[in-house]
Amino acid sequence: MTTQESPTPAGRGGRERGGPAHRGEVLRVEQLTPHMVRVVLGGEGLAQFATRGQTDHYVKLLFPAPGVTYPEPFDVRTIREQFPREQWPSTRTYTVRTWDEQTRELALDFVVHGDEGIAGPWAVAARPGDVLHFSGPGGGYAPDPEADWHLLAGDETALPAIAAALEALPADARGQVFVEVADAAEEQKLTVPDGVRVSWLHRGADPVGAQLVEAVTAFAFPEGTPQVFVHGEAGFVKALRGLLKNDRAVPRETLSISGYWRLGHDEDGWQSSKREWNRQVEAEQGE
């Protein structure tokens, strides 16, 4: 994944370390915005797929190395035992936008910027009947219906999880959502309780996350303890992490915050350095 092929989301554990993978067949492809494509997967290969109630569920997509054919059934552990490392599948992490257990349909949203990366170009070219293997799901966040209020902030890569969280909020929920996208054409219609306000931030020529940091910094917190979800590019996530934990004293147990991706790094590079990055951030922010 290149800098522009943004994962949604990355960096958390799951079933990607080995074992049988789910086998999804492309049912349809939808162009949501100029740079967001939805791929809906289905088929008998999803018979064992199940979610656990989180709204940030994610899967690890497994893209075959060019020119390499793997034995069936597709098993990550077997592949890693039998093939040299350079022939292992490439892994890219994406949020589960929706999962319908009855129809067995799984929707994944892809941020696409031309021919850059692996997953984005695959999504654009996907056609009904194409096959995609993946592991998972993982996940760890869901909105607490008992929270005093909710704060959600992220870039395009966090938008699927934010949208899923908003759909799971109770009708009487209160909160504020900040979503930064390239421009007005990238906005999406969201299902939002009456007491939750959504503010779309148009990045334009600004650095990724700059407007998010400014908006959250300027936001006057209501009374009560918020449940917070902040995800996206690691640079702005780091800035907001310090603000929320130190300046706004948000309790750690009510804060879900993580860098899904990092400018200048593909997913492989980011995953290999993320643990050290987190240690440095914790040290800098006094933890």
Image (cartoon, rainbow, N blue to C red):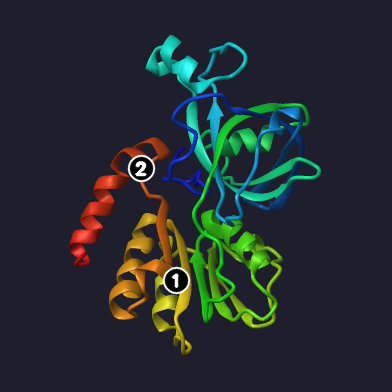
Residue 88 horizontal/vertical position (percent): 45, 20
Which of the labelled discs sits on residue 164, or is there none?
A: none
Is the residue 82 above or below the residue 114 in the image?
above
Q: Give the SS element for disc 2.
A: helix
- Position of residue 287 in the picture relative to residue 12 (left or right): left
Q: Secondary structure at mark 1?
A: helix
Q: How many marks?
A: 2
What's under tag 2, amino acid-wise?
Answer: Trp
Q: Residue furthest bottom?
A: 223
Label 1 amino acid?
Gln
Residues packed near mark 1 inside 10 Å, few (<14), some (14 to 19) or many (20 plus): many
Question: What quarter of the picture does the C terminus occupy?
Answer: bottom left
Q: Which residue is mark 1?
A: 211
Name the residue located 38 percent from the left edge and 50 percent from the top edge.
Answer: 263
Quarter of the image where one finds residue 195? bottom right
Q: Is residue 88 left or right of residue 136?
A: left
Q: Quadrant of residue 172?
A: bottom right
Mark nearest the camera among 1 and 2 is: 2
**Circle 2 residue:** 270
Tell which of 221 and 182 is nearer to you: 221
Q: Residues within 10 Å of mark 2 (few under 14, many from 20)?
A: many
Picture quarter containing residue 112?
A: top right
Q: Where does residue 114 sit, x and y in percent of width and height?
A: 58, 41
Q: Residue at x 43, y 41 (%)?
A: 13
Q: Nearer the viewer, residue 166 or 31?
A: 166
Percent of width and height locating residue 51: 62, 47
Q: Nearer the viewer, residue 273 or 166?
A: 166
Q: Please give the name of the residue rendered at 54% of the width and 20% of the height, measured from the top-left corner.
A: 75
For the view shown, which residue lies furthest in the right direction? Answer: 103
- The residue depicted at 63 percent of the width and 67 percent of the height is 166
